């Protein structure tokens, strides 16, 4: 009996120790400040941004459906991204950087003997913030206001090689993909007692996706795809100056699946209606003790483009929802414009997400994406 009690106590101590070790490193525990572990999909091109991602799985671009077969050419899409928080200014004197210039995505298409061969890369996760905030002065408080700065960078790069081929009027494709995740978070008390808290981590893995684009009626095309997102072993470093602490951190984000379907209905030669529905599975961050829950999204879009005219106009709207994250819901509104001449096409898309945090004022994630496509 004594031996059994000893084994039971040892098991309880081991379980307690394991549970204590699985926690978010500072400053990530401040979920009022960072969106981690949640993330929303970033548009990889100006066309997709202008349509509110309603074309995401249609198979016209390779990023989320490898059945896409762009004509021989290259596309590059820079993005300007800005997060406008409205919850923090309610409690602090708040200032933030106006935005960042980055790369949304790009592809290189080199079809060979009826087989579509496309190299592509994009950032499905991109969230950059840099802000400073000060506690408001209290006439009854002797201590001076406290001043803080906070920066965050959450970036996920996905690059792949897609092969596609036509069969019985439909197109099918598959792609192998490399995914790399890089995060960095800083929280610094500037005054009255300076002290920096920092953590960063990164890792990569190999996954794949498969998809199809099928005409289901004379004016209707349906596209769908499924992606395997690999498990990522992430390593990095944590620094807490106030505690004179520098130590390694590690976590594993478990593998998952995401995918969806998109449809396009050509109402006329010039007017098209698009819609999409998608989702992704939950992913636990083992070692950090958190999990990004299941996510679902829907969107609808409209595109007007006269066959003999160079201009195109786009509109999109939708909603995204994810369980168990600081920003569980986001509304999507988008506008787009396109122009083409021979082998050159220029597109511009503006996408705004509106989100709330526990009943606070609505905040915004704005993205302006410009795409340049050149055929050769």
Image (tube, helix red, strand yellow):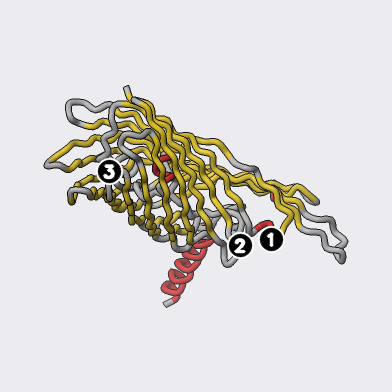
> Pointer 1: residues within 10 angstroms few (<14), some, or many (20+)?
few
Q: Which residue is rendered at x = 13% and y = 40% of the image?
A: 167
Tags 1 and 3 in contact by the CB under 8 Å rule? Answer: no
Circle on res. 90: 1
> Pointer 3: residues within 10 angstroms few (<14), some, or many (20+)?
few
Please, what secondary structure does the residue beneath circle 1 have? helix
Q: Position of residue 156 (x, y in %)?
A: 45, 42
- Residue 71, quarter of the rendered image: top left
Viewer-nearest residue: 359 or 47: 47
- Residue 179, quarter of the rendered image: top left
Q: Is residue 18 visible?
A: no
Q: Which residue is rendered at x = 47% and y = 66% of the image?
A: 10
User: Which sits earlier in the primary sequence, circle 1 or circle 3?
Assistant: 1
Please, what secondary structure does the residue beneath circle 3 have? loop
Mark 3 = which residue? 269
Label 1 or label 3, whichever lies nearer to me, is: 3
User: Which sits earlier in the primary sequence, circle 1 or circle 2?
Assistant: 1
Give the distance between the C-alpha atoms of the residues marked 3 and 2, in whole angstroms. Answer: 43 Å
Circle on res. 361: 2
Viewer-nearest residue: 20 or 374: 374
Tags 1 and 2 in contact by the CB under 8 Å rule? Answer: yes
Viewer-nearest residue: 50 or 26: 50
Q: Which residue is rendered at x = 27% and y = 26% of the image?
A: 110
Q: Position of residue 32 (x, y in %)?
A: 60, 59
As drawn, the residue found furthest toward the bottom would be 1
């Amino acid at each position: 009996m004594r031996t059994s009690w000893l084994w039971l106590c040892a098991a309880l101590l081991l379980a307690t120790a394991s549970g204590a070790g699985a926690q978010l490193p500072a400053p990530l525990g401040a979920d009022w400040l960072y969106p981690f572990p949640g993330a929303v999909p970033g548009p990889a091109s100006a066309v997709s941004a202008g349509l509110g991602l309603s074309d995401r799985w249609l198979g016209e671009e390779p990023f989320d459906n490898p059945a896409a077969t762009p004509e021989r050419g290259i596309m590059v899409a820079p993005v300007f991204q800005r997060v406008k928080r409205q919850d923090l200014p309610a409690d602090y004197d708040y200032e933030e950087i106006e935005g960042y210039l980055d790369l949304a995505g790009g592809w290189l298409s080199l079809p060979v003997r009826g087989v579509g061969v496309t190299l592509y890369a994009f950032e499905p996760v991109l969230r950059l913030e840099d802000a400073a905030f000060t506690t408001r002065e209290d006439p009854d408080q002797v201590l001076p206001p406290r001043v803080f700065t906070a920066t965050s960078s959450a970036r996920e790069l996905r690059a792949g090689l897609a092969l596609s081929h036509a069969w019985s009027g439909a197109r099918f494709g598959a792609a192998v993909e490399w995914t790399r995740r890089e995060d960095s978070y800083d929280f610094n008390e500037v005054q009255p007692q300076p002290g920096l808290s920092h953590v960063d981590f990164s890792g990569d893995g190999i996954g794949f996706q498969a998809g199809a684009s099928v005409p289901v009626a004379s004016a209707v095309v349906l596209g769908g795809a499924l992606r395997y997102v690999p498990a990522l072993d992430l390593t990095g470093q944590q620094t807490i100056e106030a505690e004179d602490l520098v130590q390694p951190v590690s976590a594993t984000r478990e593998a998952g699946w995401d995918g969806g379907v998109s449809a396009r209905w050509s109402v006329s030669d010039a007017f098209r209606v698009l819609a999409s529905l998608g989702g992704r599975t939950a992913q636990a961050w083992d070692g950090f003790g958190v999990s990004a829950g299941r996510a679902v999204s829907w969107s609808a879009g409209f595109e007007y483009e006269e066959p003999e005219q160079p201009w195109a106009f786009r509109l999109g709207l939708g909603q995204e929802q994810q369980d168990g994250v600081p920003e569980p819901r986001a509304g999507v509104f988008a506008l787009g414009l396109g122009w083409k001449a021979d082998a050159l096409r220029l597109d511009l898309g503006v996408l705004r997400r509106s989100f709330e945090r526990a009943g606070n004022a609505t905040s915004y994630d704005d993205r302006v994406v410009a795409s340049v496509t050149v055929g050769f």
